[in-house]
Amino acid sequence: GVTAEPTAFSGGFWLSSRISGVPFMLNEKQQMQSLNDRLATYLDKVRTLEATNKDLENKLKDFCTSKVVSRDFTLYQEQLKPLRDQVYILCGMFESKTSHCRYRLVRPSQVLCKLSLTVKLIK
């Protein structure tokens, strides 16, 4: 007949056939097939997750590189030069006007001082 003996390493049963004299592991074969199926499913899921992860990393990389603000203003130098020149000219004109205004403000006070000194000397 057929006897069932528990095995120590798998928790399954070792079924041995007394008729043929060839031992076989019916339950353990089923367990191994089940484990193989689960492993295959797991590996497929890992591959899918790796592919999805790689796709997301590429999208993130593309997003980050497209949002980088360049601090390189060399492209604008040609446009900025005429504006700088105009500012320089305007600053020169402003300085000239303010110098002239200072002179006009200071000169009368200098004249008044001279006149008052002259008046004091005459008295």
Image (cartoon, helix red, strand yellow):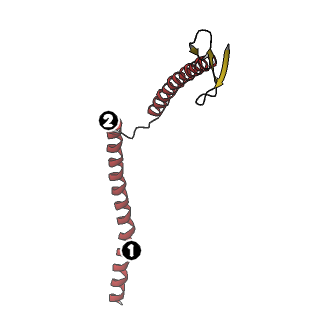
Q: Amino acid at mark 1?
A: Ser
Where the C terminus falls, by quadrant? bottom left
Disc sitting over residue 109 in the figure = 1
Relative to residue 107, is residue 36 depicted above or below?
Answer: above
Where the N terminus falls, by quadrant? top right
Relative to residue 2, is residue 106 depicted above or below?
Answer: below
Circle 2 sits on which residue? 78
Depth order, front residue of 96/71:
71
Question: With 15 as the anchor, is 48 left or right in this view?
Answer: left
Residue beneath the point at 38% across and 62% down: 101
Percent coordinates x, y for residue 17 in the rendering: 62, 13
Question: With 22 as the anchor, is 119 left or right in this view?
Answer: left
- Which picture quadrant has residue 85? top left
* Real-space Cα separation, disc 1 to disc 2, in angstroms: 48 Å
* Furthest-bottom residue in this view: 123
Depth order, front residue of 14/118:
14
